[in-house]
Amino acid sequence: MANGRVLIALVIFTLLNTNIDAKVYTRCQLTRELLKNGFSKTFMSNWVCLIEQESLRNTSALVEKNARRKYYGLFQIGSEWCKEGRKGGKCDIACEALLDEDIRDDGACAQKVQEMEGFKYWPKWVSRCKGQVLPDVQKCPDWQNPPSRASPPRNKRFLRIKRLAVSRPRMAKRSLHTKYRLQ
Ligand SMILES: *[C@@H]1O[C@H](CO)[C@@H](O)[C@H](O)[C@H]1NC(C)=O
């Protein structure tokens, strides 16, 4: 009985810890993660510079300008792009999801910000990266042979299967089967 309780406490502690733990990447680890998440090589040194200036490569960075304006995570994405406590905002994401170690959703949101606003959305990119010497990420060991793409965030995978179900039902069924077999 006591053992069981210790075990449960341990599991809870581990779960909490993995959620709270900030991951601080090295420059090359960060480059690797961005490559894995579909960031193109063309603007890699800009993204790395931006992240170094905005969050010091800390996945849990949280900056509160005031009660209504907060900036979340590695990319310091502003609160208009997410919603506290539940999915929402222009990236349709919970702000808290931008603070964990899983940067797949952060990356997708940051790319959306960049598409809609450009790099100039990030004040520190403007003041510290634009037109300046950028980090030399080509020296990183993963540059020549980037790791394979990370699978997209789970909800997106489901959406794709759902969309497939409308257009090609038989294929969607197969794809769902594979999904469950793998788990
Ligand atoms: C990362 O950011 C979090 C939240 O601001 C902070 O508590 C933590 O100390 C930072 N980690 C490092 C190594 O700077």
Image: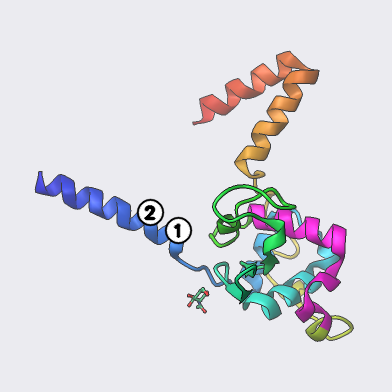
Above or below 90: residue 137: below
Above or below 174: residue 131: below
Between residue 14 and residue 68, name the one nearer to us. Answer: 68
Colour approach in the figure: rainbow
Mark 1 surroundings within 10 Å by alpha-carbon count, few (fewer than 14), some (14 through 19), many (20 or more):
some
Measuring from the top left, give residue 73's x and y in whole percent: 61, 67
Above or below 180: residue 97: below
Contact, mark 1 vs mark 2 (Cβ under 8 Å): yes
Q: Secondary structure at mark 2?
A: helix
| Residue 135 in view in this figure | no
Q: Secondary structure at mark 1?
A: helix
Label number found at residue 19: 1
Which residue is situated farthest in the right direction here?
131
Between residue 129 and residue 182, name the one nearer to us. Answer: 129
Which residue sits at x=75%, y=77%? 49
Position of the N terminus, as image quadrant, is: top left
Q: Which residues are magenta?
A: 104-126
Q: Is residue 29 left or right of residue 78?
A: left
Which residue sits at x=13%, y=48%? 3
Measuring from the top left, give residue 94's x and y in whole percent: 60, 52
Which residue sits at x=66%, y=57%? 106
Q: Is residue 9 left or right of residue 62?
A: left
Q: Quadrant of residue 111?
A: bottom right
Amino acid marked by disc 2: Leu
Residue position marked by numbered label 2 in the rendering: 15
Measuring from the top left, give residue 102's x and y in whole percent: 57, 55
Q: Quadrant of residue 174?
A: top right
Measuring from the top left, give residue 173's x and y in whole percent: 66, 17
Residue 122 magenta-highlighted: yes
Q: Quadrant of residue 175?
A: top right
